[in-house]
Image (spheres, grey):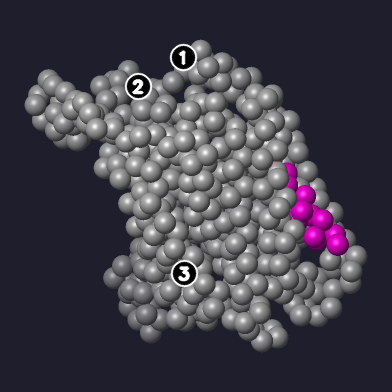
Amino acid sequence: MTQPPSAATTRPPTTSRLMFWVALLYFSEGLPLGLFYDLFPVHLRQAGVGPAEIGLLSLLGLAWTVKFLWAPLVDALRGHRFWIAGANLGMAAVLSALAMRPEALGGGESWPWVLLAAFTVLSATNDIATDGYTIEQLSRGQYGVANGIRIGFYRVGMLTAGGMLVVAGWTGTAGAPNWQAAYAMAAVLLLVNGSLALLAPAPAPRPVVVKAAETGESAWAAEWRRLRAQPLWLLALGLVIAGLLWPVLGPLAKAMQPDDAAAAVAQVNPLLSWVTANAGTWWFKGAVPVGLMLLGSSLMVVAARDPRAGAMADGPVFGGWVSLLGRSGMVPVLVFILLFKLGDAAMGFMVKPFWVDAGFTPAQIGLVSVNVGLGLSIAGGLVGGWYVDRAGIFRGLWVLGLAQALSNLGYALAAWWVPHGVPGAPIELQYQAAVYAASALESFTGGLGTGAFLAFLMAITDKQRATTEYAILSSIFAFSRAVAGWAGGLGVEQMGYAMFFLLTFGLSFPAYLLLPQVRRMLSRDEAR
C-alpha cells in the first residue's frame, strides 16, 4: 500500500524563481565535467603524459555510465538537495587533496587516479539528483526555455573550469603553471555551490511505498525476492560491475607483485603475473571493461523485455528499468541516444591536448574558452531551446544535430593548418584566429545540438520515475562519451589530430538512420 502525501504541501515556485535554480544547479553540474575535460587533460599533457594515456582518463568517466545503479537509491531516499550538497562538498574535498600535491597527478603515482575516480562518482551522483529534481519541477511547456537556460549555465560551469586554467597561468611563472591555485579555487567554488543548493525550493512530496500488499514484506525485500527468481538480471548487473571495477585490477596486481619477487609469484599465482604483464595494453585497460559493460547493459534490455519482468515493475530499484527498457520501440531509441552525440564526444576529449600541442599556454586556453566561448555557448543554448519550442523536438534533433557536426569540421581544418608549437612561444596571428574560430563554432553549435537532445530525453521520461529513468538515458550517452574519449587518444596517436577530427565528423550521422523510430516514440509520448 502507499502512504498519501502530507496535506501540508509546499507552495510551488514561480517560473522565474524556478529558472533561477535551474541556472544555479546546472552551473554546479557543468563545473565538475569541465574540470574533468579541460583542467585535468591540460595538466596531464603539460606534465608530459601522452594522448593515449590521457584518453584512458576518459574511462574514469564510466561512473557517469553506471550511475543508474545507484539512481534508484537517490530517488527512493529523496532529499535531492542534500544529495547535491553532499556530492559538491565531496568533490571539493578531492580537489583540496590534489591542491596539496598537484605534481603527483602527472608523476606516475596511483593515489591521484583513485581520487579522480572518486571525483567522477561524486559528480555522477550530483547529476542524478540535479536531473531528477529539475524534471520533477518542470512542466512539458517549460522544457524549451528551461533547457536553454540549463545548457547555457551548464556551459558556464564548464567554461568556469577553463577559468581555472587562467588562474594556473596568471599565478604561476613562465612555463610553470600554478596548479595548486587552480585546484584550490575550484574547490572553493564547489563548496559554495553545495551550500547554496540547500536553499533551493523543496520538491512536492510523493507517495511512498511501505509494504508489498500481497506479502506484507517491505517493497525492497519483495523486489529482491523477485530478482532472485530472474537470474538474468543478476548476471547483467555482475557484468556491469565487473566492467566498472576492471581498471582497478592492473594497479592492484602491480601492488601485490613487487619487481624483485615477480618470478617467485609467477610460479605460485600465474593469473596475477598475467594481469601484471597485460595491464598496460590498450585492450586490457579499455576494450575488456567496455565490452563487459556493453554486454551487461544489453542483457538488461533482454531481461526487461522478458514477460516475467512485469512482476518487478513496482519495485523501488528495478521498476524504473523495467518500465523504460520494456517499452515498445525503446531499443532503437536507446541506440539513437548512444550515437547522437558520438562524433562530438569523440572529438571533445582531444580538443585541449590539441591546444597544448599547438603551443597555447593554460592561461591562453582558459581565456579564449571563457571570453569567446561563454557568450556563444549561452546563445547557442538559448537559440536551441527557442527553436525546439517552436519547431518541435523531432525537427530540432535533426536540424540542430547537423549544426552540431559543423564544429568537428572546424577543428579538423584548424588541426590541418596550424603547426605544432612550444607553450609560451609566440603563435602567429592567423593560427590563433583559426583555433579561436574553431572554438567559437564548437561553443555555439554544441549548445544548439544539446538543446534538442536534452528536450528529447526529458520528453520520453516518466515524471513518476524521473530520477531513475533520466539517469538510465543519460548513462547511455555517458557510455558513448567515455568510450569515444578513450578511443580518441588512440586515434590521435595513430592518425594525427586533423584526420581524427575529420573522422569524428562522419561519426555524427549514423544516428540519423534511427530518426523514424525516434519520431514514433515522441508521437506516442505526446498522445499519453
Q: CA distance from mark 2 to mark 3?
A: 48 Å
Above or below: residue 522 compared with residue 15: above
Question: Above or below — where is 380 with respect to 331?
Answer: below
- Of residues 408 and 22, the one nearer the viewer is 22
Q: CA distance from mark 3 to mark 1?
A: 45 Å
User: Is residue 474 visible to the viewer in this orientation of the structure?
Assistant: no
As helix, strand or loop, the secondary structure at mark 2 comes to loop
* Residue 388, position as x, y percentages in the image: 65, 29
Amino acid beneath label 1:
Arg
Circle 1: is it few (<14), some (14-19), or many (20+) Cα within 10 Å? few
Q: Look at the magenta stretch and give its main secondary structure.
A: helix
Report if residue 442 lies within the magenta region: yes
User: Counting other residues with Cα less than 10 Å from the Cα at mark 2, is it few (<14), some (14-19), or many (20 or more)?
Assistant: some
Tell me, yes or no, whether the two marked residues, 2 and 3, touch with CB atoms within 8 Å. Answer: no
Q: Which amino acid, mark 3?
A: Val
Residue drawn at point x = 16 percent, y = 23 percent: 1
Residue 174 visible to an observer of this rendering: yes
| Region in magenta | 433-446
Residue displayed at 89% across by 69% down: 429
Tell me the tag on residue 528: 1
Can you identify the residue that label 3 sits on? 188
Question: Considering only order in the chain, which callout, 2 or 1, is on the residue closer to the N terminus?
Answer: 2
Q: Nearer the viewer, mark 1 or mark 2?
A: 1
Q: Residue 161's mark?
A: none
Q: Which residue is mark 2?
A: 306
